[in-house]
Amino acid sequence: MHATTATPPVRFTDYQIGVVGMLAFLQFAVILDFMLMAPLGAFILPALHVSPVQFGHVVSAYAFAAGITGILTAGFADRFDRKRLLLFFYAGFIAGTLWCGLATTYESLLLARIVTGSFGGVIGSIVLAIATDLFPAQMRGRVMGFIQTAFAASQILGLPIGIVLSNRWNWHVPFLALVALGVVGGFLIALWMKPVNEHLKLQAEHNAFWHLFHTVTEPRYLLSFVSVLFLATGGFMLMPFSSAFTVNNLGISLHDLPIIYFVTGIATIFAGILVGMAADAIGKLRVFFIGTGLVIVMVLIYTHLGVSNLVTVTAINVVLFIGIFSRMIPFQALMTQVPKQTQRGSFNAINASISQLAGGLASLVAGHIVQQDADGKLHHYEVAGYVVIATAVIVSFLMWRIQRGLAVTAPAPAPAPATS
């Protein structure tokens, strides 16, 4: 097995610290916008007089729009300064979020979510491309670890605030507040971030279609695309039903449910940073394998759990999410080493599209596996857990193959880190 060799830590410059903070903020805004729909459903359904099926369409519209747009824009992703490309899609994302906040009908909200997903779903891939361009491989574990804390921050800060604002006023206010916050962040990025355009000096391919075609058909990238497919499939199998399973099967009250999310979010913020440091220090593949083993064990425990107390369920959730982060962070860091510099944008855009589409399909498949009684109790949830475990094993094998391929090809050294 070719494990990533340990390297001494490299210190961040002041400018790099600022860039990581801004990229994490972008992830926070995009993830929060996506996650807001679930808790706000209780407010939106009666306010717009929509059925659960219609609301499901609103939620899935974002993911499918993001997946389709990612593929359509992949051919252009390496033809522009990444900062300008980021600001373009971020502006569209803010406009879509504003539309969500102003929507008064089901049709209007559905269209707003399509627009928001079309722009917001591409931002994550641009963020990864920028992080790859500005940071050498031995720093990317820590970079990805910090950026991934945006997920936990949105869970412990954004969701409770969104619910409070909705209770105090209405469901429109959280979206409008996110727009106000996002505009400030956008101006900071526009004024302070330097251009990210070194890849343009190496870009010899100017036809968008052929650029996309050559990225999709590059044999070295195939294993990466397949690994993203299985990783997203496993990730979305349990998530849609986790709150219902916790309440109806494990016996946790709705009043105590936010406590689990809050404690888990706090724990994963610190865990994400530590996992990133460990990935740079002892090897990304090694940390990924440790995280995979932890996830397999915790999924088996969690999906077979009966009625339990709050402390037990919270502890299991914390360990499970630490395992998830211990996979996601080194996975993303290792993926940044796969594409050539001139194909990073298109490679990440394709990966993001595969992830969104696979996640949407996995949610649909999970809906056919998991059954619910009239009293709300879920059945066959453990079967979905077995699917997660199977995909985890497959991805581990694929990651080993990818790492071995990187060791054989020995790509050119990463560009020197940006200085202040």
Image (cartoon, rainbow, N blue to C red):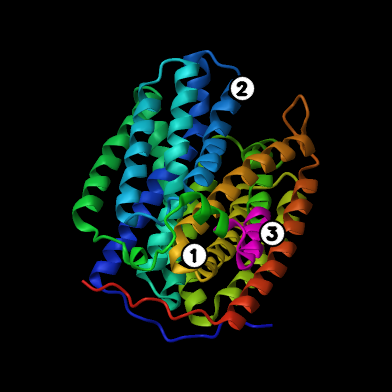
**Residue at the spot 53% in from the left edge and 19% down from the top edge:** 45
Of mark 3 and mark 1, the one earlier in the sequence is 1
Q: Nearer the viewer, mark 2 or mark 1?
A: 2
- The residue pinned by badge 2 equals 52
Image coordinates of residue 304 in percent, x first then y, are 77, 50
Q: Which residues, given as a range, are shown in magenta?
A: 215-230
Image coordinates of residue 186 in percent, x first then y, are 26, 46
Give the amino acid at mark 1. Ala
Q: Is 46 drawn above or below residue 111 in the view shown?
A: above
Of mark 2 and mark 3, the one earlier in the sequence is 2
Of mark 2 and mark 1, the one earlier in the sequence is 2
Give the amino acid at mark 2. Pro
Query: Closest to the observer: 222 or 158?
Result: 222
- The residue pinned by badge 3 equals 298
Query: Closest to the observer: 164 or 139?
Result: 139
Residue 123 belongs to the span the image colors magenta: no
Q: Mark on residue 271?
A: 1
Give the amino acid at mark 3. Met
Tag 1 secondary structure:
helix
